[in-house]
Image: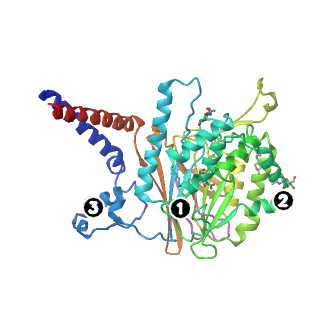
Amino acid sequence: MAIPRPIRALVDLVTIAAISLNFFIYFYPDILNAPDQCNWAHAAPHFAKYPILNKIPQQYLQPLLLNIPELRQEPEPSPHEIHMLLFGDPQINGNWPSTPYIKRLDNYGNDHYLGHIYSVMSRRLRPSHVAVMGDLFSSQWILDSEFYNRTLRYVERLFPRSAEQKANVVETHARHESYDWHRWLEQEMQLDPMERFTSRVYEDVYDWVDRDRKTANLDNPVFINLTGNHDIGYSGDATWQHMARFHHLFGQNNYVVNYARGTAHEWRLVVLDSLTLEGPALQSEFLNFTWSFLDHLEKFENPKFQGATVLLTHIPMYKRAGLCRDGPEHLYYVDNQREPYKNGLLRSHNHLSDNTTQRVMNAVFPNSDQPGVILTGHDHEGCDDWYNFEQGRWVASKNRKEEKDDDDDGSSRQSVREVVVRSMMGDFDGQTGILTGLFEHGRWQFDFTYCSFTVQHWWWASKVVLAIAIFLQSVVRLSSIWA
Ligand SMILES: *[C@@H]1O[C@H](CO)[C@@H](O)[C@H](O)[C@H]1NC(C)=O
Ligand SMILES: *[C@@H]1O[C@H](CO)[C@@H](O)[C@H](O)[C@H]1NC(C)=O
Ligand SMILES: *[C@@H]1O[C@H](CO)[C@@H](O)[C@H](O)[C@H]1NC(C)=O
Ligand SMILES: *[C@@H]1O[C@H](CO)[C@@H](O)[C@H](O)[C@H]1NC(C)=O
């Protein structure tokens, strides 16, 4: 049976649509973004692995090499560069027995949509560090079983990790036992504050599994998971169970990693659990642990640290209303009938309070001659501000204060930029935050850009149209064989 011409034309059309859509979703960084947005700041041009390719004009060669890493020579990682990708609040949902099939399919597709963004961006840029800005999951009210299930999706679909890196998650999921948080509680409570602190201070981590590694691992970047209010809860909700299972699968809530200590280009990463800074809390021990971490940082680390700091935390610093979508707001439980023991406790907050912000920033950014940068999540819209040091306090503004040279009384500080990283969810166009640190002329400088994808429907369309095209092409082929 011969296929009529119009049908053939239709099949060809569907095939072209499938190819175009797939081209679009793999090359989106260059199609949807300005030329420098989806690259490290001040990036040197790439060189092709095959000399013949170097004949292609640079304006075409560079996007080609960025999109197809197999064609390029990978530069050696430099200790004078920080290459970090940041992903705002993925907030993945779960399936319940009552979840309709269409919603299950939506959740499945959403995992792969987020995973597509990570895979395109990590292949393209080969970061040394990747941070997910908290709210990994959509709800803090889930049981251990669901927590394990979502964590497995996190390491397999969203942010695929090597077998070694995800072994703990896979094994915990396979055993599927309720997590023994009592044991962790006892361990934590027995730790002397100094011991707890020193166990949260790391040196030159380039791989959480292979701690002896001395250079960035661009195939398996250092992965950082922040606590979000949907992962452990606000301090009025957070229990030992929440905290214990988070620590088990995602790492510590507070820590510092020092790089190149004692050299001119030293810098550090501070990961801070901003959910346990303010109360009243359900478990006041958590506030004590987090403040004790900051106090120890100030007392024991700051005196021997001359470098720049990158602060990663979920809740943004205090700022007056109007600078970001969310203004300052703290809510407390009142008249909670279902859980009356929570009344009076902290129920939610958009920012840290002003006083907490001052204490955090003073402890984290001690060096008046060094820049710093803060990356947070929480407000899905995202936001970008400067914290200028004015009359002894950090004050948020859209503008960076002019640096004055005459301010030599030690009271001046470099302004610190805070980027509230816009969410990677489809509703916010699948953002990837790109942070570049560059040590040049004796100091660090930080740059931040976004690389945007688009709503998840385009990703869906590319897969559905591809499936239809493959089906139609097979029908056409088979019928021509039989004809
Ligand atoms: C988690 O996944 C397992 C199967 O891997 C399933 O048996 C279990 O019911 C899931 N947990 C929840 C809370 O849905
Ligand atoms: C973050 O979570 C992933 C998945 O569990 C894990 O591989 C990684 O080591 C975690 N990061 C830290 C700092 O523990
Ligand atoms: C934490 O608790 C310990 C012991 O109860 C106390 O000595 C310490 O001052 C507290 N630290 C902070 C920062 O509140
Ligand atoms: C904030 O700190 C200042 C100075 O330390 C103090 O006077 C003020 O009462 C504090 N405000 C709040 C709300 O705690």
Image position, residue 8 (x, y; %): 16, 31
The residues bearing labels 2 and 3 have C-alpha atoms spaced at a distance of: 57 Å
383 lies left or right of 309: left
Q: Which residue lies furthest to the front in this view?
A: 482
Disc 2 or 3, which lies upstream in sequence?
A: 3
Q: In the rendered view, would you say 102 is above or below 205? A: above
Quarter-wise, where is residue 137 in the image? top right
Q: Which stretch appears magenta?
A: 397-417
Which residue is more in the foreground, 407 or 97? 97
> Which residue is at a point 80% across and 53% down the rendered structure image?
188
Give SS at disc 1. loop
Q: Which residue is farthest bottom?
A: 263
Kindly report which numbered mark, 2 or 1, lies closer to the viewer in this rendering.
2
- Per the image, is 68 magenta? no
SS for callout 3: helix
Q: Name the residue under label 2.
A: 192
- The residue beneath circle 3 is 61
Residue 409 x, y percent position in the rendering:
67, 70
Tag 2: Cα neighbours inside 10 Å, few (<14), some, or many (≥20)? few
Q: Amino acid type of disc 3?
A: Leu
Circle count: 3
User: Could you tell me if residue 337 is visible in this image?
Assistant: yes
- Per the image, label 2 sits on a secondary structure element best described as loop
Vertical order, 367 against 100 (above or below): below
List the residue tagged with mark 1.
402
Q: Examine the structure image and report whether residue 408 is included in the region drawn in magenta.
A: yes
User: On residue 32, which mark appears?
Assistant: none
The rendered magenta stretch, by its main secondary structure, is classed as loop
Relative to 328, is 290 on the left or the right?
right
